[in-house]
Amino acid sequence: MVKVRFNLIQVNEIGESREVVFPYEGRWFRMDWNKVPERFKVLYVAMLKLQGLEIPEDLKEYERDAIDVSDIDIEIDLSQCEEIPGMYPLGG
């Protein structure tokens, strides 16, 4: 397990699915959305709300009335990720 700051993790929307892309120790990784830790999803939905964006139906289960943002590190299991080139296409 490694810790990655929330703000370094990018969400790619690919058609009907999502993935996250992030740097760690000079390398880039991607992770399928279904493997992304719940903590990230909760913070991601909170960020969308703060930006005034509509929460997609499939993310509504991650809406919370209150969340603790004292620690915004996300623990990620790198064995569940795929290393990607730095020029990997980002969509969104």
Image (tube, rainbow, N blue to C red):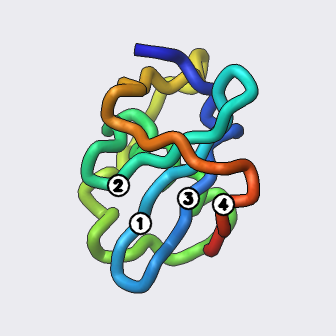
Which is more N-terminal, label 1 or label 4? Answer: 1
Q: Is residue 83 left or right of residue 32?
A: right
Marks 4 & 1, CB-CB < 8 Å contact: no
Indicate the amino acid at tag 4.
Answer: Tyr
Q: CA distance from mark 4 to mark 3?
A: 13 Å
Element type at mark 4: loop
Residue 90, horizontal then vertical, whole percent = 66, 67
Could you give the CA–CA distance between mark 4 and mark 1, rounded to whole angstroms? 15 Å
Q: Does 78 sit above or below residue 57?
A: above
Identify the residue at horizontal 44%, vertical 21% (top origin).
75
- Decide: few, some or many residues near mark 3? Use Cα within 10 Å; few <14, some 14-19, many ≥20: some
Q: For the residues marked 4 and 2, what is the alpha-carbon distance in whole angstroms?
A: 17 Å
Say which element carries label 1: strand
Residue highlighted by disc 3: 11
Give x and y (percent) for residue 57: 30, 76
In the image, which is nearer the foreground, mark 4 or mark 1? 4
Quick one: label 2, few (<14), some, or many (20+) residues within 10 Å?
A: some
Measure the alpha-carbon separation of dots 3 and 1: 7 Å
Q: Amino acid at mark 3?
A: Val
Name the mark on residue 88. 4
Name the residue that disc number 2 marks.
Answer: 33
Between label 4 and label 2, give the one nearer the viewer.
4
Amino acid marked by disc 2 = Trp
Quadrant housing the N terminus: top left
Q: Which residue is mark 1?
A: 18
Rendered residue at 41%/26% (across/down): 78
Per the image, label 3 sits on a secondary structure element best described as strand
Q: Are marks 4 and 2 in contact (CB under 8 Å)?
A: no
Q: Is residue 81 above or below residue 18?
A: above
> Mark 3 or mark 1: which comes first in sequence?
3
Q: CA distance from mark 2 to mark 1?
A: 5 Å
Q: Is residue 35 left or right of residue 26?
A: left
